[in-house]
Image: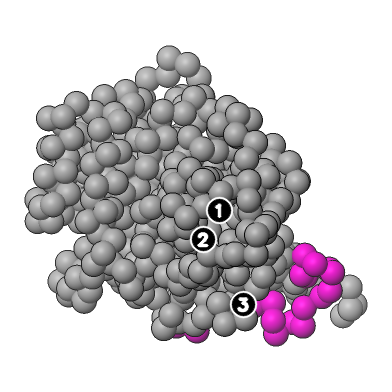
Amino acid sequence: MSANVDLNQRPDYDPELQAIADYVLGFSFKNRIESQEALETARHCLMDTLGCGLLALRFPECTKHLGPLVEGTTVPHGARVPGTQLRLDPVKAAWDIGCIVRWLDYNDTWLAAEWGHPSDNLGGILAIADHLSQRRVVKGGEPLFMRDVLEAMIMAHEIQGVLALENSFNRVGLDHVMLVKVASTAVVAKLMGADRDQMLSALSHAFVDGQSLRTYRHAPNAGSRKSWAAGDATSRAVRLADIAMRGEMGIPGVLSAPQWGFYDVSFSKTNKDQAIKPEADRRFRISQSYGTYVMENVLFKISFPAEFHAQTAAEAAVTLHPQVRDRLEEIDRIVVTTHESAIRIISKVGALANPADRDHCLQYMIAVPLAFGSLTAEHYEDDFHLTHPVIDLLRDKMEIVEDERYSREYHQADKRSIANAVQIFFKDGTQTEQVAVEYPLGHRRRREEGVPQLKEKFRSNLATRFPAQRCEQIFALYEDTAQLESMPVDAFMELWAI
């Protein structure tokens, strides 16, 4: 046989896909409550994520993307987009929900070798659950319940987060939203009733897709695509799950196929010097089984709508504000001690072209609270930046220094700190103390402190869109776990419609 002839023997599905499929198809809390902490955290995550979506509806750059692709389209049993009057097909509804919850960079976060925002998966989960529930009720069947949504969220968090623990997609130039697509595909397929073959087919198509590059997250090309990229990913997941449910064949060797598979094509090179990884390093490293770990340890953004690597830096800057607000012109230098991931992802100098550029700039997210004592979504807008030149003056005085302990403990499973420290040095030789914050308010280690403030954040976000009576109705549901879990999804989504 010629060496140039491929052996056409169809392989089994890659074991990485089989592990995800078996986890999703076998996962259920209904008969075995294993982690009340995961369920409680999922409840907080659900409401916080939707609240972030409501807040984003105040920004025209976000809302311009919403609605049907063809104006006037009517969709029977269309999925609702919270805070709007829209009823869309589930693919576009997933896009819109994912867009609004991600727009302000205010939803939950997962940081490991890769980072991302697991609640981005809620776009696909809610869209398909709402649509399916309405269809089932019309046919005399039983709808999906919010307990199903919470379980789907836990699974999606787990898939995205475990894949991110030891696998850095950003180092090969890929954006973390590919993990949203993979996780959403799995849980949406389950909600649609997929069997194992259909699940594996859907997952294989999620990986064989061309994956998003990180270009739009980094200087000098940072832009607003990063605010809708996750919506696009979770929407694509709904489409791929639907394709698989129609009987489309899968691609069993999508990861491991020599030359043509994901590992060789997309995971074999570093984006720094294009060196080829050894073959053993191209496969995913998955050091723990899928369970509920990620939801239990997820990070909430409570204090600031800011990229998470800067949350503790902004908190330190707010602490220093009273000491420096009247001495801004006297500042000689600002020393920021941080971790390697923050330096690689959000440290930047030079002009900042747009709000998306600013909310991913470590120096900007320190300068604003130093000068003004707070950091809100409005602080990233062009009008604010252009009328306050002091922000760029402060940025120019910053020195960014890595602390190796900070970098090390960022990755340690028993810590997962996101540490930053800020110290101000004045021209007269005096200085402030160094204010160090190692764990942000939304960290698991600060849950008891953070949850009351998370609830206040939710109340505030509700009030941006709904009258007081509706706000109280939704908040009361948030507080009543049993009522929330037993509520049909279509009834829940009706509460969020305008």
Is-magenta flag for residue 276?
yes
Q: Image check: 297 left or right of 331? A: left
Q: Image check: 281 left or right of 134? A: right
In the rendered image, which residue does mark 1 sit on? 366
Depth order, front residue of 190/428:
428
Label 3 – label 2 distance at C-alpha:
14 Å
- Kindly identify the residue that appears in the image at 33 percent across and 58 percent down: 153
Crowding at mark 1 (Cα within 10 Å: few <14, some 14-19, many 20+): many
Tally of numbered discs: 3
Of callouts 3 and 1, the N-terminal one:
1
- Kindly identify the residue that appears in the image at 51 percent across and 38 percent down: 379
In the rendered image, which residue does mark 3 sit on? 403
The type of residue carrying mark 3 is Asp
Does the CB distance between marks 2 and 1 fall below 8 Å?
Answer: yes
Is-magenta flag for residue 436?
no
- Kindly identify the residue that appears in the image at 17 percent across and 40 percent down: 474
In the rendered image, which residue does mark 2 sit on? 313
Q: Image check: 440 left or right of 483? A: right
Of callouts 3 and 2, the N-terminal one:
2
Depth order, front residue of 26/465:
465
